[in-house]
Amino acid sequence: MIAGRTPWLAVAVAAPAVAGCITTGPDGPRLDHVELEGVGVEAEGVVLSMASATLEKDGTGTGAAVTGTRYSRPPLEIDAPRTSWDLKARSAVFEGGVTAKRGEFTLTCDTLTVTFAAGGKNDAVDLAVAEGNVTISRDQRTATGERAELHGETGEVVLTGNPTLVEGTNRLNGEVVRLYLDDERISCEKCHLVIDGSAIGPGSR
């Protein structure tokens, strides 16, 4: 059995059977207690299965007959015509038209500089800096700019140099666009958003 407080913003829970206790207070109905059977929980890097679980109103919970699996973030794969290494600085420069892939994301650029974490494993990327004609794509979403920084620990990409994000006929421009590769989030500073007219008004649904 396990017990603990759950970081709900980073957790997905699924269960075929759910029972709960709802009480009414001055602020309206409130869910005080939840019981689940056949529970599946997924958080960053961990998948758990439980025969049953309970959740309380304060965010704590318990689970019985728990089994779990850890998984790692997807690797960063890089292809380039030329590369040079500085072993003392633990860095490598890829040039001549670079293609880098991480999970479902593909990045292309003129030059990519990769710095590896000091004191860590040889393949632990601390920072990857892409420069020149930067394009980051996934499915129907494409981001472009002149410079991008990929932070290996967090999976955050900081895109600058007239960064633009295009999805279908919609376009987002800003001073800085941040992409979070592991949890499908985007943030933008000083943004300008253009939404296709067909998505607004009668018949848009």
Image (spheres, rainbow, N blue to C red):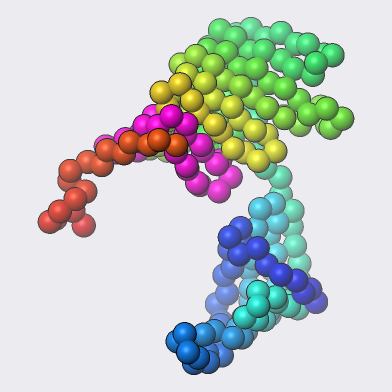
In the rendered image, which quarter contains the C terminus?
bottom left
Give the quadrant of residue 55. Answer: bottom right
Which residue is at 59% across, 68% downward? Answer: 13
Which residue is at 47% across, 34% downward? Answer: 177
Q: Depth check: 71 or 86 in front?
A: 86
Question: In the drawing, does residue 94 fall left or right of residue 170?
Answer: right
Residue 5 point in image, percent of width and height: 71, 70
Q: Eyeballing the image, is 151 above or below 23?
A: above
Give the quadrant of residue 101. Answer: top right
Give the quadrant of residue 100. Answer: top right
Q: Depth check: 198 or 29 in front?
A: 29
**Chain part drawn in magenta:** 164-188
Residue 39 point in image, percent of width and height: 63, 73
Determine if the magenta segment contains residue 178. Answer: yes
Which residue is at 48% across, 25% downward? Answer: 160
Which residue, as the protein is rendered here, is positioned at the far left?
202
Q: Main secondary structure of the magenta part?
A: strand
The answer to whether residue 35 is seen in the rendering is yes
Which residue is at 50% across, 14% downward? Answer: 132
Which residue, as the protein is rendered here, is positioned at the far right?
119
Question: In the drawing, does residue 183 fall left or right of residue 122?
Answer: left
Q: Eyeballing the image, is 197 above or below 80?
A: below
Determine if the magenta segment contains residue 83. Answer: no
In the rendered image, which quarter contains the N terminus?
bottom right
The answer to whether residue 108 is seen in the rendering is no
Residue 91 point in image, percent of width and height: 74, 17
Question: In the drawing, does residue 110 fall left or right of residue 1?
Answer: left
Q: Depth check: 41 or 188 in front?
A: 188
Q: Eyeballing the image, is 198 above or below 173?
A: below
